[in-house]
Amino acid sequence: MENESLPITQENWVPVDKAYLGVLRIGFSLVHLIGLAVASVSAWLLPDPAHYVCFVVIALLLCSFLWLFFILAPNRCARTRYLLREQDINLQKGFMFWQLVSIAHNRIQHLEVRQGPLERHYGLASLIIYTAGTLGSDLIIPGLTLAQAQQLKSQLLNSINAEALDVNEPI
Amino acid sequence: MSGADMNGSDSNELNKAALDIAHADIPRAEWQRVSPIAVIYFLLTNIKHALNLWPALVGMLANQHAREWLFSYGVPVLALVVLGFAFLSYWFFRYQFDAEKIQIRSGIFHKKRLTLNFDRVQEANLEQAIYFRPFGLWTLRLESAGSSKEEIALPGIHESLALEIKQRVLLSKEDIREPSDMVAAALVDFSLKLSVLDLIRYGLMHNTMIYVVAIVAPLLGQNDAVWRTMANVVERLAFTRWLLDYLAVHDAIVGVFLVAILLVIFFIAIYSFSIVLAVIKFWNYSLLAQGERLQFEAGLFNRVACGFRKHKLQTIIIKQSFFAQLLNRYSLEIRQTNERAKPGAPLQGFIIPVLTINQLNDLLVLLGVDKPCWQRTRAIQIFWRTFIWGGLLTLAVAAFAQLTALISLLWILLPLPLIALVSWKVWYSKRFSLSANGFAIRQGLLGYTIAYIPQIKVQKLALSQGPLGRLHACGGMGLWSGATHESINYVDLAKLHECHATILHKVSSFKGHWM
């Protein structure tokens, strides 16, 4: 199965930084560690027949961990890429569930460069593009280097400012 | 008062009013209080806030001692506190306004001072609560534009004052608009008044009670005490005794007949209630469209006047429920930006409850909605829905039959055809339309809902494809407007790309204001 059966082919998509894989993997690991800890403590505390449920949960958690760590994370990292065009910005992501998100420059409300503790460790940052739409109408580009994120942000800002001038120009 | 009065006259009168205000001799520079009747308004809002403390109440009720204490001291003290706060809220609530802005000071402990420039006001709506009506007082709600959306409510002011402030808002708007707009405003493009018959239709079309009953009934069913009390009451009724005697002599068929009658009575009761709600909400509904502006006024107890400017439109929702199809009527709702962001909004969205097909078409032309060109999604979804949901349900029924032996194993034959039928109808009703200026999605099971988004209002656009989509070369699309999120799945790949490219191009090449 070819993942890019919905491509915007002609242009060059920019893949995110390789270090994003580390962020994904540590993120998944942390979540699973917490889950495993809770399940183990429950298995230890619960009486005899009930703790089998915890064993099942632990087994499921291990499976999902292996899947996420070794298959999903590398694929997602490799397939997350963005494309800045003259009038819009696009992001592709997803391994099993492919997604392409587009926002036109003239709909951007504000921009934010965000760096969580994990991302800071790898020198990465995310660029968040907000629109005026309802819940979930923003676009997050993860796995950019800090410099890349700042540059992309200023590029977008320039493009927005240029457009604002267009509107004000008398006809 | 009627919608025409409130909407403020024709252009001549508007100009006259402009002159009047320019030479207004009443100075409005000092801080003023609203009418003391507004204490009721603050009382009600305080009670609304206090209701957020209900979890504490649950804790109190669980404990015997706390319960006694609560009823002997707690309730009176609480009542006094709430009343005191209402009075203080009223006492500290002051406003002042001049030609450009309105200022409001409020708050008991946490002082707040709010300044709102009239030219920033998006909408000025008048509302008359039932307790204000005998005194001829109104509540004026002003909404500002911008990302930090503020709403000012000025409760308990006289009609003349409310209209004056509203006029100032309108005047500061007129300045930035072209003069031709003033002339256009004088002509009424569309008007609609709903009779009681229409409201009865609405009550039949949109019966929310049926869902309430469906949720409450099982909850009541779980409670034995409720059943016992009900049984006691019913047993004591003379009618029941007569009924039992009657049934003892007559056939079982008569019993079935009686149950049917009871059901009919039950439905009549529910639908009557729904109609009563509709009448309370939309009593004396009148809609007026003039140029850029649409305005409606409605309500039996709480009179609401809600306005709306065409350029703020984000999504149009057309609904025709099953009953509405029988009655041949439609409902229309217009969503504006950040609909959910305003607290205490009088009504959700801008609703036109009952429309005939001709009225609907006129209104859609007025709002600049394109004629749809409907296209279907891929029919393969019927198979997958049936396969997945039908399969799961069959397994569940089989397991239930095996484990409990309460039902025959033959019931496993039911889910697949049932789900297939439902999936077919869902697919049959689901359509999308990419027209010159808009994108619309139509879906429903018994009735249908159409969501229309003007292409230039699209904020974000997403295409998606899961494993099933990859198998059949189709995918889904999601659109976010300023007010809603709409999505459609199982669309042919080529069409999906066409929609994506067209809408994105339309959005980026539109240079005007969109909010």
Image (cartoon, coloured by chain):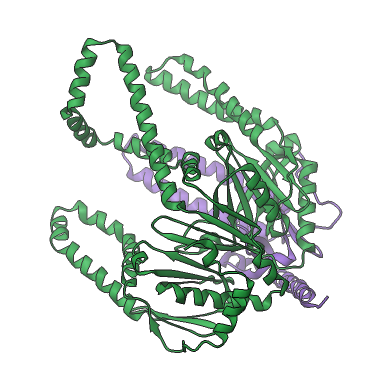
Chain colours: A purple, B green
Question: In this orientation, which residue lies closer to the viewer: B78 or B161?
Answer: B161
- Toward which corner of the image does residue A81 lie, by quadrant? bottom right
Q: Is residue A98 in view from this perspective?
A: no
Figure check: B376 above or below B93: above
Which x, y percent locates residue B2? Answer: 50, 61
Looking at the rendered structure, the number of numbered marks drawn on it comes to 0
What residue is drawn where x is 77% and y is 64%?
B510
Which x, y percent locates residue A93? Answer: 70, 52
Question: Does residue B235 appear left or right of residue B211 in this picture?
Answer: left
Question: Does residue B24 appear left or right of residue B155 in this picture?
Answer: right
Which x, y percent locates residue B244? Answer: 21, 18
- Toward which corner of the image does residue A109 lie, by quadrant? bottom right
What residue is drawn where x is 44% and y is 56%?
B299
Which x, y percent locates residue B504? Answer: 76, 56
Question: Does residue B206 appear left or right of residue B175 in this picture?
Answer: left
Q: Is residue B366 in view from this perspective?
A: yes
- Toward which corner of the image does residue B326 lie, by quadrant? top right
Question: Does residue B248 appear left or right of residue A31 in this picture?
Answer: left
Question: In this orientation, which residue lies closer to the viewer: B455 or B254?
Answer: B254
Question: In this orientation, which residue lies closer to the viewer: B304 or B380?
Answer: B304
Q: Looking at this rendering, what residue extends furthest in the right direction?
A: A10
What residue is drawn where x is 61% and y is 33%?
B426
Q: Quadrant of the C terminus of chain B?
A: bottom right
